[in-house]
Amino acid sequence: MHHFSPRSLRTTDLIRESLIAGLASGLLSAAAVAWGSRAGGHRAVAGLNAPSHWLWGDEALESDACNLRHTGVGVATHVASALFWGGIYALMRGWHRRPTPLNAATDAVILTGAAVVTDYLLVPRRLTPGFEARLTPRRLGIVYLALAGGLVLGALCSERD
């Protein structure tokens, strides 16, 4: 019986792969949030303000203004969250003997499912992303699809020989 361990994931590789996957997923999902906000009749920044509700409460969920207080904190919170999930994704990718596009997509779907469960079932309301205040369930689903797509894109961009 062969016991698997992470494939040559040095700390620098793990950090690099976490950053690439996290930033790609954060960028694509933020674009989906902005699109979903706009499609719902709000300003594009309205959904991006929502994650700042952990700090500013319900006023952040209602803010349509582009400002450092809500937009800056909201985007920073979203990026930090994406980097967190990108780190877990990089660890997951490291357990594959041979990374492929198929297992990259499978890992992304599994991890995105875990993110949805965490975001909406496990954490207190104050720590949810807040996107649900501005997006329909369908548009919220598109945000999570964009998150998964960004993880896969990040994996494919950072694959090593």
Image: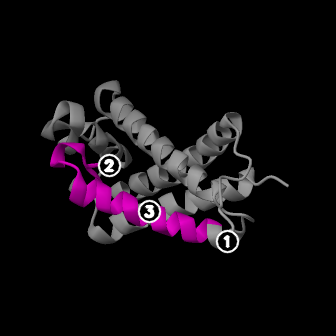
At 46% from the left and 40% from the top, the residue drawn is 79
Q: Is residue 20 left or right of residue 120?
A: right
Which image quarter is the N terminus in? Answer: bottom right
At 44% from the left and 62% from the top, the residue drawn is 112
Q: Is residue 80 left or right of residue 116?
A: right
> Of label 1 and label 3, which has the lower sequence position?
1
| Nearer-the-camera pick, 39 or 160 | 160
**Based on the displayed image, in which of its 4 quarters is residue 159 positioned?**
bottom right
> Of label 2 and label 3, which has the lower sequence position?
2
Residues under numbered marks 2 and 3 in contact, where contact means CB atoms less than 8 Å apart: no
Q: CA distance from mark 1 to mark 3?
A: 31 Å
Q: CA distance from mark 2 to mark 3?
A: 19 Å
In this picture, which residue range is highlighted in magenta?
104-131
Q: Is residue 30 left or right of residue 56?
A: right
Residue 105 in the image: state x and y as whole percent. 59, 69
Task: Work out whether residue 132 can be spotted.
Answer: no
Are there few (<14), some (14-19), or many (20+) residues within 10 Å of tag 2? many
**Based on the displayed image, in which of its 4 quarters is residue 2 positioned?**
bottom right
> Of label 2 and label 1, which has the lower sequence position?
1
Residue under label 3, please give it.
Answer: 112
Residue 24 in the image: state x and y as whole percent. 59, 49
Which image quarter is the C terminus in? Answer: bottom right
Residues under numbered marks 1 and 3 in contact, where contact means CB atoms less than 8 Å apart: no
Nearer to us: label 1 or label 3: 1
Residue under label 2, please give it.
Answer: 47
